[in-house]
Amino acid sequence: MTLKKFLTIGFVAAVLVACGDDSSSAKSSSSEKKTESSSSMTSSLSSSVDSSSSGTGESSSSSGGLSSSSSTESSSSVASSSSSAESSSSSVASCSSGAQSSSSVAYVDPSTVVKGSMTDERDGQTYKTVKIGTQTWMAENLNYAYTGVPYNYQDYGPFAPDSFSTSDSTSWCYDNDPANCSKCFSDIPSDCYKYGRLYTWAAAMDSVGLWTANGKECGLGKTCLPTYPVRGICPEGWHLPDSTEWNMLFTAVGGLSKANTMLRSDGDWFRSGNGLNLYSFTALPVGSRDEYGFGSESYNAYFWSSSEYNSSHACKLTLWHDPSNANLYFGSKYNGFSVRCLKDE
């Protein structure tokens, strides 16, 4: 065999292998219909912002004229940008880890769930809770005001060159409207739910170690490999669930194919997107925030996990307004998503 032919065969083989990896990644990312924004390609955060600085305060959030027209995020760019980063790290967690069919987790009859409440001693806010099998979840989104910390984003990537986003906070009420952190859907008090705040992953993880060190220095541009459990921004006695714990919840409600319907609230979703809410988890379509502004309200719900995917992404749960399966995939750490806390065992 000539050297030329040998090199040609080797090249073709390499292309086939690469295509196989790309198609697998594309298949995964295509299910993220409205997830990551294109700016996840090449980004830079101010050193005072996402990974190394957080804090608390009560100042109101302002986006400084950010557009709120963005309701989609392009997952294909996320997959392509993260796949190369992933290849250099063997310690990165898989968002689908913690097998949904684990023998230690069983289906839970909806009639056995136990409703309750808890109070966050830091600010006195009370939250509805629900015990599903062995797990006790907040049945509302966290609304603790993690504010007063500058958020500065600049994208140097090809899709949005030299775009900037600034805010006085790393957590926000949707559209920077305080009324969106708590909403009532009728005049009946029991029909009021906390939409909660939207947090960057660094804020959700308590990256400055204000309460615990398990999520300290976890933010954009770093691989921190957090130690379970991560209290993060949650009240004392509660923690930010990891991907295994989200997968346990999926199993308890009948699997990924049913979780989207079982966990969604039975109101406020776009058109016919309401769920059955049989487990009183009451996932509301809060939407999200990215560097362009706010979007996806009434369409999607996003929840952070404490599981890191790579230096730029962490695992998050997405619930859709259509019959799609629930999705546990990765999201860019600078985005603002909701937080549901899980009670410590």
Image: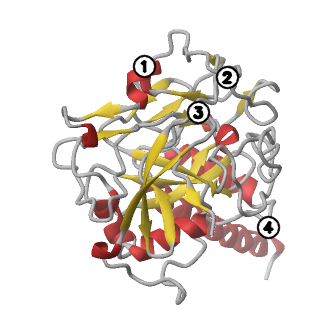
Q: Which numbered disc, 1 or 4, marks the residue that appears first in the sequence?
A: 4
The percent coordinates of residue 343 (x first, y second) are 58, 61
Amino acid type at mark 3: Asp
Between tags 1 and 3, which lies in front?
Answer: 3
Q: Name the quadrant containing residue 241.
A: bottom right
For marks 2 and 4, give the CA distance: 38 Å
- The single residue placed furthest to the left in the displayed view is 272
Secondary element type, mark 3:
loop
Asked if residue 170 is positioned above or below residue 177 in the image, the reply reads below
Label 1, on which residue? 177
For marks 1 and 3, give the CA distance: 19 Å
Label 4, on which residue? 90
Amino acid type at mark 2: Gly
Q: Which numbered disc, 2 or 3, marks the residue that appears first in the sequence?
A: 2
Which numbered marker is on residue 123? 3
Label 2, on which residue? 57
Between tags 1 and 4, which lies in front?
Answer: 1
